[in-house]
Image: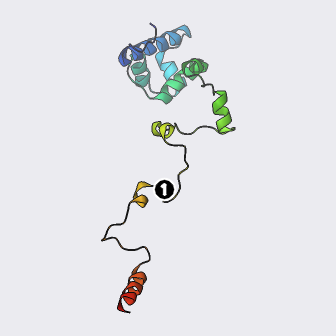
Amino acid sequence: MKFLDKNSDSAILKELGSRIALHRLNRNLAQEELAKEAGISLRTLVRIEGGYPAQTPNIVRLLRVLHLLENLEALIPEPPISPVQQLKMQGKQRKRASSKSAASASKQPWSWGADDNSQAPKQDGDKDSAGPASKQSSKGKNRQ
């Protein structure tokens, strides 16, 4: 069976379990022996070979004992970095994906007071930024 996107998760797990069982038999190992060498319970091995979900560390342990660990390189190869990305990163390693909105946002750098709220006109009930001192001085001017 080939692993294809159209295959169900359970079908893929059953195939993985069957392949692990075949590799175990090709190495002439009983289930008890493989489980002990891998440091997992016999029940866990039986479940994996039966196509049930398993924790990743248990599968890694089995692959190590069966000398199949190097095949993980083919499963998830290291992605190549584009030359443009290398220039942008200048030797740094990416930690996050770019947001979708960042690409479409304007190229102007963000600065304090540049948001929409600071641009809003003051209304009659809004306090002056100078505080109570400015109100007293304006009252004093009205009395003269």
Amino acid residing under circle 1: Ala
Q: Is residue 27 above or below residue 33?
A: above
Residue 6: x %, y % from top left: 38, 13
Residue furthest front as drawn: 144
Q: Is residue 105 above or below residue 25?
A: below
Residue 35: x %, y % from top left: 49, 22
Q: Quadrant of residue 128?
A: bottom left
User: In this orientation, which residue lies closer to the viewer: 61 or 37?
Assistant: 61
Q: Is residue 81 above or below residue 103?
A: above
User: Within 10 Å of the Cα at label 1, are there few (<14), some (14-19), or many (20+) other Cα atoms?
Assistant: few
Q: Which residue is labeled 1 in the image?
A: 114
Q: From the viewer's perspective, tell me whether residue 38 is left or right of residue 15.
A: right
Residue furthest left as drawn: 125
Q: Residue at x 51, y 28 (%)?
A: 39
User: In this orientation, which residue lies closer to the viewer: 93 or 87?
Assistant: 87
Q: Quadrant of the N terminus?
A: top left
Q: Residue at x 47, y 17 (%)?
A: 31
Q: Considering the numbered disc 1 on the image, is that residue within a helix, a strand or a loop?
A: loop
**Could you tell me how many numbered marks the image carries?**
1
Q: Residue at x 42, y 24 (%)?
A: 44
Q: Is residue 93 above or below residue 78?
A: below
Residue 13: x %, y % from top left: 41, 17
Residue 61: x %, y % from top left: 53, 26
Q: Residue at x 53, y 52 (%)?
A: 110
